[in-house]
Structure formats: C-alpha cells, structure tokens
Amino acid sequence: MNGGQPLYIVMLGAPGAGKGTQARLLSEALNLPQVSSGDIFRENLKNQTPLGLLAKQYMDAGGLVPDDITIDMVMERLGRPDCADGAILDGFPRTLAQADALDQALARQGRCIGVAPLLEVADEAVIERLAGRRICRECQAMYNIDSSPPRVEGRCDKCGGELYRRADDDPETVRNRLFVYYKQTAPLIGYYYAHRLLVPLSGERPIEAVQADLQAAVATAAAGGRVR
C-alpha cells in the first residue's frame, strides 16, 4: 500500500471491455476485494431490498441506475471491514456526480483514489464479446461461447448450474448501453485524466498481457508516484 494508506482503484472502460475479469485477477494478486456495482445490485435483489428491485428495472433495460440508488449501495459496501485496506471498484463510479460523491466520501476519511486504469476496446468487439457471454444462474461464473466456453454446453463448469445470456447482453441492448456509456460515463476519462490518475491500456490483447500492465500501473500508484 501507499505509505500504509488504503489503495482504491477505479476500473474504467465500456461494457464488455473486460473490467470484471481484470478486476478479479487484480483482486487475487493484491488481496483486495473486488467491489462490483453489478454484484452489489444482485445482492440487494437477492435480499429483496427496495433498492435492488428498483435497480434491476434499469439494468434490464440497458440503462444506468440513478446516482442516489447506486451511491447508497456502494458506500454501504465500502464501509464493510474487508474494504479497510482498499478496494477495486468495478462499474462504479459511472457518472461525474458519482465520482465526485466517491471522492468526497473517501476524503472525509482521509483517503483518495490511487489509480484509474482505462481498458480500451473497439465498439464492435464489445458487441461481439457480450453477445457470446453466458452467466451461471447459481454461482454467477462467467463464460463466453466463443473464447471461453464451458466444458458442457449450457452448464457451469464449477457448479453445474444453468448458463444464460443476460437481457442486457442482447446486441441491440448493448448498442444502447454503449450510447449511454458515451453520454454519461465516458466523461470520467477526462475527470481522472485531469487528476493525473488515468492509465489507458489496450483491452484487445491477451488477458495476461493486460493484467501485467495493469499490475505495473497499480504498483506505481501504490509506491506513491503519479501514474502520468
């Protein structure tokens, strides 16, 4: 960690850019929790919280969940003991308002974001990736029928659960998600660039190559240096 301070990493990139995969590998390497807004939404839905049920309406339509709902759920998650040393934020913040709210919340605790890696992937590659994505209904393990298929078609390798394609991974819905991303989320690139925290990385390379560069960028931030 940076001088003993918690390390907070914000993963940036369009839907399907590989943020979840890279965040999971980074979580294992650094022993920091991966805090995914999608996982938080599903947890709230599983527990039948009002916030979770409301969030699902926006997720299924391919839109972004309103800031107040998202911030409430994410800040509760960051307040748990396993985030005391930091966290890898995957899918949050998604708007400038959320980024500002996160910065303010961390600042009240004397903390701040350490680095914001950006995974860059072409739009058509994103659409192709998400059209082939399948998720286990039981354990949420993720597959791709083209690049990382399960051993048995339609079944999870880990638990045998049924695999399905999320409604928001339909190609037409993905195009809408990309539109929403460029309109509401892409401004974060400028936000973190201005704060000298942005590290652009090509996400169209092998997973291992992207991860190596990602760990190098995080190591620079953890050592207390500016990444750019």
Image (spheres, rainbow, N blue to C red):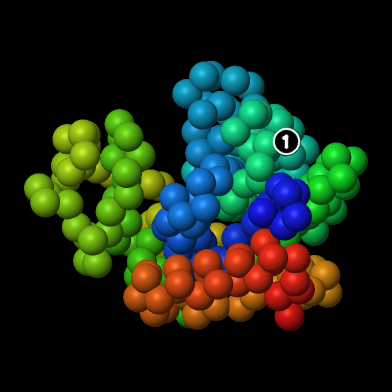
**Disc 1 packing (10 Å; few <14; some 14–19; many ≥20):** some
Residue 73 seen in render: no
**Number of marks:** 1
Q: What kind of element bears circle 1?
A: helix
Q: Where is residue 12, by image quadrant?
A: bottom right
Residue 55 seen in render: yes
| Residue at 32% from the left image edge and 56% from the top image edge | 133
Q: Which of 54 and 198 is in front in this view?
A: 198
Q: Position of residue 198 (x, y in %)?
A: 70, 73
* Quadrant of the drawing holding the C terminus: bottom right
Given the current orientation, which residue lies at the most extreme front position?
Answer: 3
Q: In this view, does 226 lie above or below 16?
A: below
Q: Position of residue 138 (x, y in %)?
A: 30, 31
Q: Is residue 38 above or below residue 175?
A: above
Given the current orientation, which residue lies at the most extreme left position?
Answer: 152
Q: Mark 1 points at which residue?
A: 75
| Residue at 65% from the left image edge and 71% from the top image edge | 220
Q: Where is residue 50, by image quadrant?
A: top right
* Quadrant of the drawing holding the N terminus: bottom right
Asked if residue 89 lies left or right of residue 45, the reply is: right
| Residue at 28% from the left image edge and 44% from the top image edge | 164
Given the current orientation, which residue lies at the most extreme top position?
Answer: 48
Q: Nearer the viewer, residue 205 or 129?
A: 205
| Residue at 52% from the left image edge and 19% from the top image edge | 47
Asked if residue 86 lies left or right of residue 127, the reply is: right
Q: Position of residue 106 (x, y in %)?
A: 82, 45
Amino acid type at image mark 1: Met
Q: Is residue 194 above or below residue 91?
A: below
Q: Position of residue 180 (x, y in %)?
A: 63, 62
